[in-house]
Image (cartoon, rainbow, N blue to C red):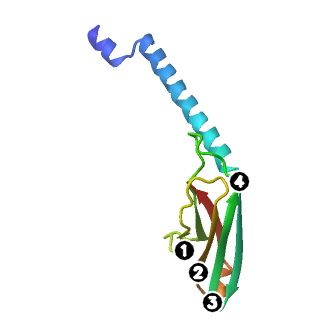
């Protein structure tokens, strides 16, 4: 009887495991909803210019960024890639602007590469906190 109990969970154990699993799924769902709503808000202003073998990406500012979960204004920076980039060689970052939902970066990010390569890349810019 003792061996049977050890290898076969009791109904009570199964119910507790199901409740715990349901709570974990609910928390995961809440985090996904919160992160999705945070990700989809705000605007970013960039300008892009190519001249003499240099792609210049001017990161101007962002606006209407949401507050972080604790209610404070975010400290943010912008990350830029030219995709595809499996080894992250085109990764460029701005400086961090502290505690602002409307940060002004005013930074020039440069890529020295031929136009033939630039024309087959996709510029990806993301705002991080």
Q: CA distance from mark 4 to mark 1?
A: 24 Å
Image quarter hosting the C terminus: bottom right
Q: Residue at x 53, y 66 (%)?
A: 95
Sequence-first disc among 3 and 2: 3
Sequence-first disc among 4 and 3: 4
The dot on residue 42 is 4
Q: Which residue is mark 3?
A: 53
Q: CA distance from mark 4 to mark 3?
A: 32 Å
* Residues marked 2 and 1 touching at CB (< 8 Å): yes
Q: Residue at x 58, y 44 (%)?
A: 72
Determine the secondary structure under disc 1: loop
Determine the secondary structure under disc 4: loop
Residue 31: x and y, percent? 58, 38
Sequence-first disc among 2 and 1: 1
Left or right, residue 86 beside residue 124: left
Sequence-first disc among 1 and 3: 3
Image depth: mark 4 or mark 1 in front: 4
Q: CA distance from mark 2 to mark 4?
A: 26 Å
Q: Residue at x 50, y 21 (%)?
A: 18
Residue count near mark 4 (Cα–Cα under 10 Å), binned few <14, some 14–19, many ≥20: some
Q: CA distance from mark 2 to mark 1?
A: 7 Å
Q: Which residue is mark 1?
A: 90
Residue 112: x and y, percent? 57, 85
Q: Which residue is mark 2?
A: 111
Image depth: mark 4 or mark 3 in front: 4
- Taking the view exactly as shown, the residue that stands out farthest to the top is 1
Compared to residue 11, the image places residue 23 above or below, namely below
Determine the secondary structure under disc 3: loop
* Residues marked 1 and 3 touching at CB (< 8 Å): no
């Amino acid at each position: 009887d003792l061996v049977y109990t050890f290898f076969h969970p009791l109904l009570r154990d199964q119910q507790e495991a199901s409740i715990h699993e349901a709570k974990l799924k609910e928390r995961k769902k809440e985090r996904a909803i919160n992160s999705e709503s945070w990700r989809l808000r705000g605007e970013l202003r960039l300008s892009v210019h190519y001249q003499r073998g240099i792609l210049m990406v001017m990161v101007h500012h962002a606006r209407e960024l949401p507050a972080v979960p604790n209610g404070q204004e975010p400290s943010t920076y912008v990350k830029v890639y030219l995709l595809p980039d499996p080894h992250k060689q085109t990764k460029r970052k701005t400086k961090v602007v502290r505690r602002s939902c409307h940060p002004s970066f005013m930074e020039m990010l440069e890529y020295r590469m031929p136009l033939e390569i630039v024309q087959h890349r996709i510029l990806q810019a993301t705002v991080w906190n």
